[in-house]
Amino acid sequence: MGLLALVLTIALCVVAVFVGLFVWAVRSGQLDDLETPAERMLHADGEELPAARAPAGPRDPPGR
């Protein structure tokens, strides 16, 4: 029974560390731009990529 308590305590500590790291990554902006790194290999060497894209929003109807 003591071994089970030890293993559960260690597992909960590991989970808490990973959740803390995930929250830190989200708050520091690590997950803001997920598309640019994937597209980087498609562009020619030395060609600049646009910074971050604006989020897609509702489009204006034609004629405005």
Image (cartoon, rainbow, N blue to C red):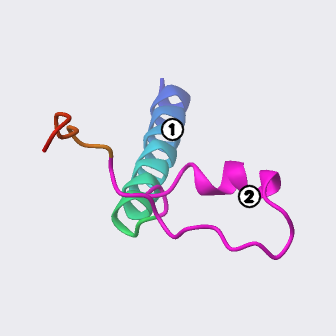
Viewport quadrant of the C terminus: top left
Residue that badge 2 annotates: 40
- The answer to whether residue 15 is left or right of residue 3 is left
Left or right: 5 as drawn, with respect to 34: left
Q: Position of residue 51 (x, y in %)?
A: 51, 70
Q: Are marks 1 and 2 in contact (CB under 8 Å)?
A: no
Say above or below: 56 vs 3.
below
Residue 16, above or below 60: below
- Mark 1 lies on residue: 11
Q: Residue at x 43, y 40 (%)?
A: 12
Helix, strand, or loop for circle 2?
helix
Whole-percent x, y for residue 5 in the image? 45, 32
The mark tally for this picture is 2
Label at residue 29: none
**Stretch of the chain drawn in magenta:** 30-55
Placement of 34 over or under 3, stated as above or below: below
Image position, residue 15 (x, y; %): 46, 42
Three-letter amino acid code at the position of disc 1: Ala
Label 2 crowd bin: few (<14), some (14–19), many (20+), radius 10 Å: few
- Specify the principal SS of the magenta part: loop
Residue at mark 1 to residue at mark 2: CA–CA distance: 38 Å
Tag in front: 1 or 2: 2
Q: Secondary structure at mark 1?
A: helix
